[in-house]
Image: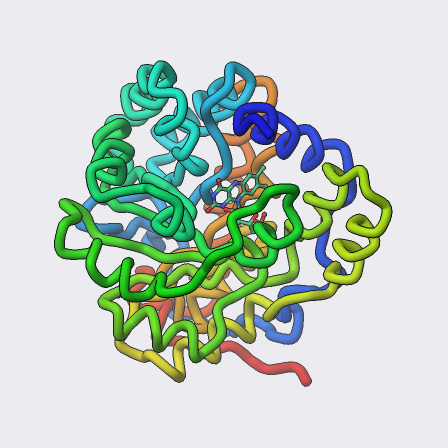
Amino acid sequence: MDIQRRKDDHIRINLEEDVRSALTTGLERYQLPHEALPELNLMDVETQTTVFQKKVGMPLLISSMTGGTDATDRINAHLAEAAQTKKVAMGVGSERVLLEHPERTAQFRNIRKRAPDIPLFANLGAVQLNYGVKKDDVLRIIDAIEADGLILHLNPLQEALQEGGNTDFSGLSSKISKLIPALPVPLIVKEVGWGIAPKTARLLYDAGVRVIDVAGAGGTSWSEVEKHRLWDEKKQKLASSFVGWGIPTALSIELVKKEVPEATLWASGGLTNGLDVAKVLLLGASMGGMAGRLLSAAQDGPEKIIDLLDLMQEELRLAMFLAGARTIAEFQTKSLIRLV
Ligand SMILES: Cc1cc2nc3c(=O)[nH]c(=O)nc-3n(C[C@H](O)[C@H](O)[C@H](O)COP(=O)(O)O)c2cc1C
């Protein structure tokens, strides 16, 4: 299967089909703190923070999605323009396509041109380290977007359901460990919507990974996405069985935080608004990421994405005000209220 056709399929399916997980994120079980007397002037509340030494408008990441075909490069262009306007961090989708089609490098370079000031992250499936991807390839994909960090994604279930998927995940933690000293930028490891368990977090931390994005369950389900690309009825049924799979985002943050309190945590998977971002910050993450929620807004241009990001920033700012926190650092000292 041609990798570029797969990229276009993924976008089409995400836009046209209901590919949500049967699980919820678990964030709905928490209430943000409310201080009727916040002892603050709303005018003084600021959502700005830093990500790898770069100033951003708020701790929100446009999660890795796509790139490498005409249609998906357009989406990335819109996302990058919005990210630059709002000064938020952004990940590009897997750049494996760039290794197989080096002629697409210019399109990836354009993403950085549109967003010169933001933290921008390269992306590759970690499993590719078992399928011929070498250190120099990784350096190329980092260079292509002048990345501030490299995100390796872990997606064993997706690969297992995909026709011809890459399912040899053996020995990967030691390959990741060997790769880290060769990288000119920090490494982040993420899931794609099924969450990170404590044992995996420990394995990653011991391998030298310092930033983990849990990318938990409760949002986009990649077994559902892959189901729509399968022709064989048996395989479709198999994919269907996993609609409720994974570790919900809130639980994954809590478990990983407990197992590796030293790690920097990012949280994504099913986040839909600024209040969800506020909640993951209070659970212990330093940034909240979103993919599915921003994809449909990215079709026509940057405007709708900017509007959404404006709304999310204001939601976060109000949540901070009502918690009595002037800065993100102050906000992170507050606690959520558990409802059940
Ligand atoms: C269209 C689309 C393409 C994606 N492609 C990638 C990818 O190439 N690499 C990656 O690490 N994650 C990829 N993801 C996963 C997201 O980064 C994210 O982890 C996941 O969708 C859960 O977040 P969400 O519930 O906000 O969508 C993709 C998600 C979407 C919606």
Q: Residue at x 65, y 29 (%)?
A: 9
Q: Quadrant of the N terminus?
A: top right
Q: Nearer the viewer, residue 39 or 164?
A: 164
72 lies left or right of 200: right
Q: Residue at x 31, y 38 (%)?
A: 120
156 lies left or right of 142: right
Q: Quadrant of residue 213?
A: bottom left
Q: Residue at x 54, y 24 (%)?
A: 4
Figure coloring = rainbow
In the image, residue 76 lies at what x, y percent? 46, 26
13 lies left or right of 184: right
In the image, residue 28 lies at what x, y percent? 66, 69
Q: Is residue 138 above or below residue 126?
A: above
Q: Nearer the viewer, residue 166 or 17?
A: 166
Q: Quadrant of residue 300?
A: top right
In the image, residue 320 lies at what x, y percent? 43, 62
Q: Quadrant of residue 243?
A: bottom right
Q: Is residue 131 above or below residue 193?
A: above
Q: Nearer the viewer, residue 66 or 279?
A: 66
- Is residue 43 in view? no
- Is residue 42 in view? yes
In the image, residue 180 lies at what x, y percent? 19, 56
